[in-house]
Image (spheres, helix red, strand yellow):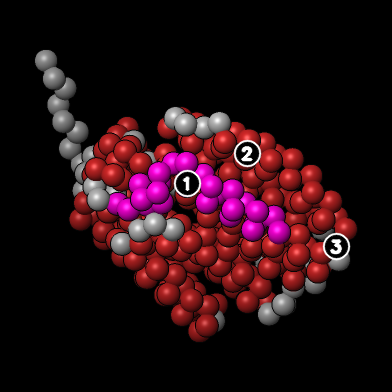
């Protein structure tokens, strides 16, 4: 006897939490507050913790990020049924039209919160919300373009804090570059991980167009560019602690490249994707030592 098919509902807290990737949202919020306190840090840290506009900026960022995750799940439902069927929410726990309504409401809230911070921040939030939709609808199915879009949006979360405080702090740029490259590399690895479903539904990601071997070579070149750029920008800050920390971080990064060279199965790339997330978190934590 077959089990009854699960009927999607108008509301599911479990489904919303799963789609919004709460752990990722917490990392974004942590990165923004730590950027303000430890990188810009021209005042007592309580001044930043109690800054209402910084809170609104952070809230706008995580609301728009959650909206991006949700619309991505909406457009990827057929792909996800192949790549990760146990994690599908759209059409299982939540009705498709409900998911679209939630996405629209979150976008409006995110842009309005940005406008409360400043007119300029509001316009950037509007542009980011459009880019997130465009990524889910088209860009992620193209080689490299979608990966770069996600990387730029991730680094933008850090740069927004600098823009709000108008600090021009070079340390912020260093971490924005770090976030850009780590995210870019992770997104390409996720494309390798999701090749099976992407190929079935007409996506043309890097591993589908060039194969896994050439895609790995692209990651190696990106890694070289990442390290070189980070060295140049870090030296320009003349911060000994930052140079030492990133030097130590080079050890697990070299290990990551070694594991990448030996990876050939889906589970291998799943582990590497998680490893990149930990590298990002470790990088963010380093702000404390500056």
Label the magenta part by its dominant secondary structure: helix
Q: Is residue 1 left or right of residue 259?
A: left
Is 221 colored magenta in this rendering?
yes
Q: In this rendered view, identify the residue nearer to me: 16 or 69.
A: 69
Numbered tag placed on residue 214 in the rendering = 1
User: For mark 3, what is the residue?
Assistant: 239
Point out the frontmost of discs 1 and 3.
Answer: 1
188 up-or-down from 37: above or below: above
Q: Residue at x 28, y 36 (%)?
A: 82
How many numbered marks does the figure carry? 3
Q: Earlier in the sequence, mark 2 or mark 3?
A: 3
Numbered tag placed on residue 256 in the rendering = 2
Q: Is residue 60 visible?
A: yes
- How far from the left and from the top, in percent, is residue 14? 36, 40
Disc 1 from disc 3: Cα separation: 36 Å
Q: Local crowd at mark 1 within 10 Å, few (<14), some, or many (≥20)?
A: few
Q: In this rendered view, identify the residue nearer to me: 158 or 263.
A: 263
Q: Local crowd at mark 3 within 10 Å, few (<14), some, or many (≥20)?
A: few
Q: In this rendered view, identify the residue nearer to me: 119 or 81.
A: 81
- Element assignment for label 1: helix
Write the start and end of the magenta stretch as one range: 203-228
Q: Residue at x 26, y 38 (%)?
A: 81
Q: In this rendered view, identify the residue nearer to me: 45 or 206.
A: 206
């Amino acid at each position: 006897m077959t089990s009854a098919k699960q009927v999607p509902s108008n509301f599911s807290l479990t489904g919303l939490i799963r789609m919004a990737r709460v752990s990722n949202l917490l990392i974004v919020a942590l990165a923004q507050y730590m950027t303000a306190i430890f990188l810009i840090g021209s005042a007592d840290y309580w001044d930043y913790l109690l800054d209402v506009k910084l809170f609104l900026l952070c809230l706008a960022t995580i609301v728009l990020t959650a909206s991006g995750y949700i619309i991505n799940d909406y457009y990827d439902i057929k792909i996800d049924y192949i790549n990760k069927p146990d994690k599908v929410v759209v059409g299982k726990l939540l009705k498709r039209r409900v998911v679209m309504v939630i996405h629209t409401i979150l976008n409006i809230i995110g842009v309005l919160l940005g406008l409360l911070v400043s007119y300029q921040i509001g316009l950037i939030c509007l542009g980011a919300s459009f880019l997130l939709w465009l990524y889910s609808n088209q860009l992620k199915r193209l080689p490299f373009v979608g990966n770069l879009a996600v990387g730029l949006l991730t680094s933008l979360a850090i740069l927004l804090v600098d823009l709000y405080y108008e600090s021009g702090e070079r340390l912020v740029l260093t971490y924005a570059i770090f976030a850009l490259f780590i995210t870019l590399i992770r997104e390409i690895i996720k494309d390798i991980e999701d090749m099976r479903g992407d190929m079935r539904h007409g996506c043309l990601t890097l591993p589908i167009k060039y194969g896994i071997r050439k895609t790995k070579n692209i990651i190696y070149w990106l890694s070289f560019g990442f390290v070189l750029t980070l060295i140049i920008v870090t030296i320009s800050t003349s911060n000994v602690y930052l140079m030492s920390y990133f030097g130590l971080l080079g050890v697990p990064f070299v290990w990551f490249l070694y594991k990448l060279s030996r990876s050939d199965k889906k589970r291998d790339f799943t582990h590497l994707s998680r490893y990149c997330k930990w590298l990002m978190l470790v990088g963010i934590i380093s702000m404390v030592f500056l």
